[in-house]
Image (cartoon, rainbow, N blue to C red):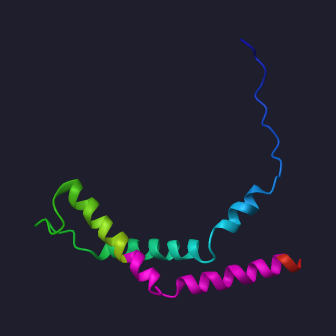
Amino acid sequence: MSTKPAVAAPVVWDGTAAATRATIRPGEATQKFEAFIIQSSLEAMLPKSENGYFGHGTAGDVWRSMIAEQIGDQIAKAGGLGLRKLLDHNLSSSNDRTKTS
């Protein structure tokens, strides 16, 4: 058995990250982020009653989470809370500044 120390291989830029970035539609990540924020807020607002409105135990928790996820996605797709627009604007102006530097 060899006792050579492990050495990290150097990272070589081959342009694949740029190609991956190009396949993501503009605004898709910010829409998903906004949907996640809405989902988190909805989960906190949905009832956690003992009468089993969404079911009992783990199944009820999963069902409640799935409902919050779907409602959050639909709200974000319909325009959301304006967070996506704000993030898209800030990201595009940040990208413009880095391109001119």
Depth order, front residue of 64/24: 24
- Image quarter where the N terminus lies is top right
x then y, percent, for residue 11: 80, 46
User: In terms of depth relative to the viewer, which is nearer, 19 or 43?
Assistant: 19
Q: Nearer the viewer, residue 44 or 96?
A: 96
Instruction: Give the number of marks.
Output: 0
- Residue 58 percent location from the top left of the image: 23, 54
Return the x and y of residue 24 as percentages of the image width and height: 63, 68
Magenta span: helix, strand or loop, mainly?
Answer: helix
Residue 67 highlighted magenta (yes or no): no
- Tell me where residue 91 sits by quadrant: bottom right
User: Which image quarter: residue 29?
Assistant: bottom right
Residue 37 relative to residue 52: left or right: right
Q: Nearer the viewer, residue 21 or 4?
A: 21
Q: Specify whether 39 is left or right of 26.
A: left
Q: Residue at x 41, y 82 (%)?
A: 75
Which residue ends up furthest to the right in the rendered image?
101
**Looking at the image, which residue is at 52% across and 88% down?**
82
Q: Along the horizontal axis of the image, is 98 left or right of 88?
A: right
Q: Measuring from the top left, give residue 57's x and y in whole percent.
A: 19, 55
Compared across the picture, whether 64 is left or right of 70 comes to: left
Q: Which residues are magenta?
A: 72-98
Q: Residue furthest top?
A: 1
Question: Which quarter of the image is occupied by the C terminus?
Answer: bottom right
Q: Is residue 68 above or below residue 75?
A: above
Q: Reply above or below: 101 against 6.
A: below
Residue appearing at x 26%, y 74% in the figure: 46
- The residue furthest left is 51
Q: Is residue 2 above or below residue 23?
A: above
Q: Residue at 84% across / 77% down in the picture?
A: 99
